[in-house]
Image (cartoon, coloured by chain):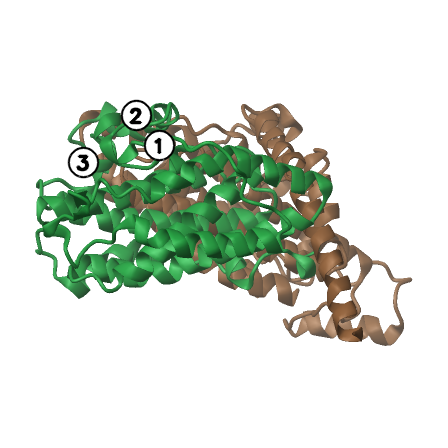
Chain colours: A brown, B green
């Protein structure tokens, strides 16, 4: 496994659609990006920059929302009241992350209704990791440790993303994600210090989540299509492979503390590189899951669709009530 | 629905950091002394209150990831977390009388040993049922905890003092939704009317006195500590009547369910709920998590 050299940030021009905006607007945008400052919603921006952000931020929001499901499934069965409270609060945090991100996306002019429709109609993507099942309690540990852990590695650089509302949402979210990772680690630690059945449960969960969590960073750099432009725009700061390496380097010592192993015979310290080497990932599986043919794609989307449809009458009632009472207030004021 | 006209109070969207929730218990314990052991009568009283909170928290937890809108996933989780916090404090306190932990009591008692009322055992149903159940329960609980802040038992007093503020929010949340659904559309109004018919029979049991009285008077061991539930009824009735009237709804004239939860006689719904809640803990007896 080789890791590409850090890229020069301005290999690609920040403004791609040369026909857009006035010379002045384009120059201002370019200088904000060049100075590594923030673009705000009212600022002029190239339409491709806006589209890229709407796509990335809404995918991120959808991931938070779909990601609630595998863990929410364990709230009712959590094996202690303390764990039940922590898990409930965690899943609630993820709903909060979805809300921040939808709000941040709305500042770019695309409403939550539109984004939600794209999700439930199966037209939008979300992180493929949530299409894997969580059959045991140890999955709550593995998801927190590996999935929230990978999310942090991905998202910490996004706290410096060039679009202000996204960067600020990421700052809030990253704080909570690091709690989640620690809690996942604690679940596994408790299991690894427990009975043999608990230890086996923990190891089994890590065996299942390890490779999918590494694939959360996206395809290898050589095949990553959007990366160069996103880097030029200061949305993305590090390549997929760089982040994946950083994640593996972070995990290995933590796994040693847990006494847990990873299902990768090639995982080994490389003195020369100063990093851990690891084996090739199964990118065919990644493509399958991404294409909607993972173990839980259908049920995750169906659950979201059901919640949306079952709640339609509630949202309609709330809207009707708001209209009626607004009318009453006006009448009252007139009288 | 856009972010600006979301029909929830601000509090509902600001979810609490995980640490707050989980440290609830430590706060109450440290402020009142870890070691106080309640008498059996006080422990049984705390157990009844704790079981109500636990069972309702378990039910509300099922909404998370299934609510009508994201703000409600957050709001219902808030309420569930508050109730779970109350349950943990009450069960931990009760358990000291029998040398049992909160988890011993939650996971290793069988159905007849639970002391929850039938109202909290009723299923979530549609959102209207969940709201009506919450309106009834938090209205009752608000009156109850408002009295228990005067309890001479320091632990009960401390739990009630913290809980009453949270329950006030639960009640407000239920009131706001009762208004929206009662007045909103014909469909929402009809669903609320149905939910009231289904759930109103379980109101009476909340105000049954037999668990805390002997010969028609508060048991001497509970004197100054517990509340006689029937004394809360008038305030409950007037407050709920006022809300229902504003929501263009009425409390239905209906039958009164027998109750019996405080004696361990439960509805059919409790067994499956406990089976799900307890399954993993019972697969690994003695394990810690
Ligand atoms: Fe998150
Ligand atoms: Fe998270």
Q: Residue at x 56, y 41 (%)?
A: B67
Q: Based on the displayed image, in which of its 4 quarters is residue B105 positioned? A: top left
Q: Residue A210's x, y, as percent?
A: 42, 34
Residue at 41% x, 46% y is B137
User: How far, Cα to Cα, is label 1 from label 2?
Assistant: 7 Å
Q: Are marks 3 and 2 on the same chain?
A: yes
What crowding class fits label 1: few (fewer than 14 Cα within 10 Å), some (14-19), or many (20 or more)? many
For numbered disc 2, what is the local secondary structure?
helix
Verify CB contact (< 8 Å) between mark 1 and mark 2. yes
Q: Percent x, y for residue A281?
A: 50, 31
Residue located beneath label 2 in the image: B279
**Secondary structure under the numbered disc 3 in the rendered image:** helix
From what the image shows, is residue A115 above or below residue A308? below
Q: Which residue bears the numbered disc 1?
A: A77
Measure the C-alpha gap from mark 1 to mark 3.
15 Å
Image spot of residue B273 (x, y percent)? 37, 28
User: In the image, is B287 to the left or to the right of A50?
Assistant: left
In screen coordinates, is A331 left or right of A127? right
| Quadrant containing the C terminus of chain B in the rendered view | top left
**Ligand 2 neighbours mark 1 (CB distance < 8 Å):** no
Marks 2 and 3: in contact by CB < 8 Å? no
Above or below residue A50? Residue A212 is above
Q: Between residues A128 and A272, which one lies in front from this camera angle?
A: A128
Chain identity of mark 3: B
Mark 1: secondary structure: loop
Residue B250, position in %: x, y?
A: 58, 45
Residue under mark 2: which chain is it in?
B
The residue labelled by disc 3 is B104
Whether residue A246 is visible, yes or no, is: no
Sequence-wise, the earlier of marks 3 and 2 is 3
Query: What residue is rendered at 74% in x and 53% in y?
Result: A111
Is disc 2 on the same chain as disc 1? no
């Amino acid at each position: 496994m080789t890791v590409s050299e850090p890229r020069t940030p301005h290999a690609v021009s920040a403004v791609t659609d040369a026909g857009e905006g006035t010379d002045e607007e384009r120059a201002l945008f370019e200088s904000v990006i060049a100075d590594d400052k923030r673009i705000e919603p009212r600022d002029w921006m190239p339409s491709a920059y806006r589209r890229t952000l709407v796509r990335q931020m809404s995918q991120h929001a959808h991931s938070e929302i779909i990601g609630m499901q595998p863990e929410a499934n364990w709230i009712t069965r959590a094996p202690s009241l303390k764990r039940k409270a922590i898990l409930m609060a965690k899943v609630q945090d993820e709903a909060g992350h979805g809300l921040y991100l939808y709000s941040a996306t709305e500042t770019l002019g695309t409403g939550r209704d539109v984004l939600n429709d794209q999700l439930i109609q199966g037209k939008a993507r979300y992180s493929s990791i949530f299409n894997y099942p969580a059959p045991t309690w140890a999955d709550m540990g593995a998801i927190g440790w590996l999935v929230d852990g990978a999310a942090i590695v991905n998202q910490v650089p996004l706290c410096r993303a060039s679009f202000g509302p996204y960067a600020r949402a990421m700052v809030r979210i990253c704080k909570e994600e690091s709690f989640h990772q620690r809690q996942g680690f604690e679940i596994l630690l408790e299991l690894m210090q427990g009975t043999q059945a608990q230890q086996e449960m923990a190891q089994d969960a890590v065996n299942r989540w390890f490779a999918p969590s590494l694939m959360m960073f996206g395809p290898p750099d050589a095949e990553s299509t959007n990366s160069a432009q996103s880097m030029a725009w200061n949305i993305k700061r590090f390549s997929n492979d760089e982040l994946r390496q950083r994640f593996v380097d972070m995990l290995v010592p933590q796994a040693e503390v847990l006494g847990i192993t990873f299902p990768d015979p090639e995982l080994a310290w490389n003195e020369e590189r100063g990093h851990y080497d690891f084996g090739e990932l199964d990118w065919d599986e990644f493509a399958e899951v991404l294409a909607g043919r993972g173990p839980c794609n259908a049920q995750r989307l169906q659950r979201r669709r059901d919640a949306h449809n079952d709640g339609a009458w509630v949202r309609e009632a709330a809207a009707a009530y708001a209209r009626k009472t607004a009318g009453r207030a006006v009448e009252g004021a007139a009288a | 629905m856009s972010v600006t006209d979301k029909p929830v109070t601000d509090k509902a969207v600001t979810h609490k950091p995980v640490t707050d929730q989980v440290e609830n218990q430590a706060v109450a314990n440290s402020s009142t002394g870890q070691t106080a052991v309640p008498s059996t009568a006080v422990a049984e009283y705390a157990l009844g209150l704790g079981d109500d909170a636990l069972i309702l928290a378990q039910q509300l937890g099922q909404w998370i990831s299934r609510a009508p809108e994201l703000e409600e996933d957050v709001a219902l989780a808030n309420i569930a977390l508050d109730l779970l916090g109350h349950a943990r404090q009450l069960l931990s306190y009760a358990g000291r009388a029998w040398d049992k932990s909160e988890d011993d009591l939650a996971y290793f008692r069988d159905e007849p040993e639970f002391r929850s009322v039938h109202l909290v055992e009723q299923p979530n149903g549609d959102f209207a049922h969940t709201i009506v159940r919450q309106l009834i329960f938090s209205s009752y609980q608000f009156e109850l905890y408002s009295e228990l802040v005067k309890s001479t038992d320091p632990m009960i007093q401390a739990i009630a003092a913290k809980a009453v503020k949270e329950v006030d929010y639960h009640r407000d949340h239920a009131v706001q939704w009762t208004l929206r659904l009662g007045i909103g559309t014909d469909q929402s109004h009809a669903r609320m009317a149905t939910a009231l018919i289904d759930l109103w029979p379980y109101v009476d049991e909340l105000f049954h006195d037999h668990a805390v009285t002997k010969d028609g008077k508060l048991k001497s061991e509970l004197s100054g500590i517990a509340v006689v539930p029937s004394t809360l009824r008038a305030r409950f009735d007037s407050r709920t009547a006022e809300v229902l009237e504003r929501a263009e709804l009425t409390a239905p004239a209906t039958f009164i369910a027998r109750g019996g939860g405080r004696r361990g006689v439960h509805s059919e719904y409790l067994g499956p709920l406990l089976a799900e809640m307890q399954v993993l803990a019972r697969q690994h007896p003695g394990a810690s998590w």
